[in-house]
Image (cartoon, grey):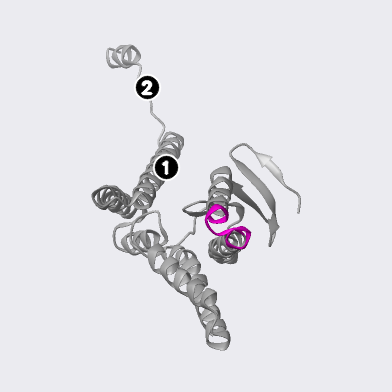
Amino acid sequence: MRIISTGAAVRVGRLLGIPIYLHWSFLVLITGYATVSGLRGGVLDAALTLVGSTALFGSVLLHELGHAMAARFYGIRTAHISLYPFGGVAAMEGMPGEPRHEMVVALAGPAVNFGLAVLFGAGFVLTSAMPWAWMALLNVMMGLFNLIPAFPMDGGRVLRALLSWKWGFVQGSQVAIAIGRGFAVLFVAGGLAFGAWNVVLVGGFLWFAVHIERRRLDQMVARERAWIASLNRRFNPVYVVNTQKCRDFSER
C-alpha cells in the first residue's frame, strides 16, 4: 500500500476508485491508545487495541463509502474520503439535484452501519465472542448518532431535504444550518457540564462544519444572483435617452 503525504492528511490508498486519506490526528490517537494499553496490559493489549481501532474505523470508512456509492448512482463523483478521530468525510464534487436524492445519499451511510451490525451480530451468535458483540453495538450506535438531525450530519441532511420540499433549497438550508448550530452549542454545553470532553470536541467539530456549510450556501446564492443579474442585463437592456436630442426634436 503506497502512502502519500498531503499536508495534514496521509493518503493510504484507493478503494472503489476513491482515494482514502487518514488525518494525522487519527494516527496520533491510535498510537496513543495502543501505547497506553501496552503500558497497562502488555503487548497483547496493545495489539488488541490496534485491531479494535482498525475495525472501528473500518466501519467509518464503509459508512463513507456508502455515501459515495449512493452519490455515484446519481452521477456525483467523490474526490476523496478522509478519516478523522471523530468520523469521516466523503468529499463529493457536487450535490444531489433533488431532495429525495439527497435523502438517499444521506441515509446510505447509516444503512451500511446497520447492515454491519447485523453481520457482527451474526458473528456473535455463531461464536459467542464478545468482540463481535461490541462491534455490532458500536455500529448501531454509530448509525443512530449520525441520524441526529444536526446539519451537516446525515440526519441533518435528511432534515434539509424534507425542508427543501416545503420551502425550497435555500430556505430549507438556512433552517437546517440554524438547527445544526443549536445542536453544536448543546453538545459543547452538555459536554462541559458533565466533563465529557469527547462530546465537547464533537460539538466543536460540528460548529466548524456548520460554518463551512453556511459559507458554501452564501457563495452559491451569490453565484446565482450574479447569473440572474447577467441574464437581466442580456435580455432587458438599459436604454440611455439623450435628452438634448429629444428637446431639439420637439422644438422643430
Which three-letter amino acid code belongs to the residue tagged 2? Val
Residue 183 point in image, percent of width and height = 29, 53
Is residue 38 located in the magenta-colored stretch of the structure?
yes
Magenta stretch: helix, strand or loop mostly: helix
Q: Is residue 125 left or right of residue 225?
A: right
Q: Looking at the rendered structure, which numbered label has been put on residue 185?
A: none
Q: Is residue 100 left or right of residue 42?
A: left
Asked which quadrant contains residue 141, the reply is: bottom left
> What element does badge 1 sit on?
helix
Residue 136 in view: yes
Callout 2: few (<14), some (14-19), or many (20+) C-alpha neighbours within 10 Å? few
- Magenta range: 37-46
Work out which quarter of the rendered image holds the C terminus and state it: top left
Work out which quarter of the rendered image holds the N terminus and state it: bottom right
Residue 78 point in image, percent of width and height = 60, 55
Q: Which residue is mark 1?
A: 212
Q: Classify 20 as above or below 73.
A: above
Q: Is residue 175 left or right of residue 65?
A: left
In this orientation, which residue lies closer to the viewer: 247 or 90?
Answer: 90
Residue found at the far right of this picture: 2
Residue 161 point in image, percent of width and height = 37, 62
Which three-letter amino acid code belongs to the residue tagged 1? Ile
Q: Are marks 1 and 2 in contact (CB under 8 Å)?
A: no
Residue occupying image coordinates x 49% and y 64%: 105
Q: Classify 104 as above or below 227.
A: below
> What element does badge 2 sit on?
loop
- Marks 1/2: CA distance? 43 Å
In this orientation, which residue lies closer to the viewer: 1 or 30?
Answer: 30
Q: Which residue is mark 2?
A: 240
Residue 114 in view: no
Between discs 1 and 2, the one toward the N terminus: 1
In this orientation, which residue lies closer to the viewer: 126 or 94?
Answer: 126
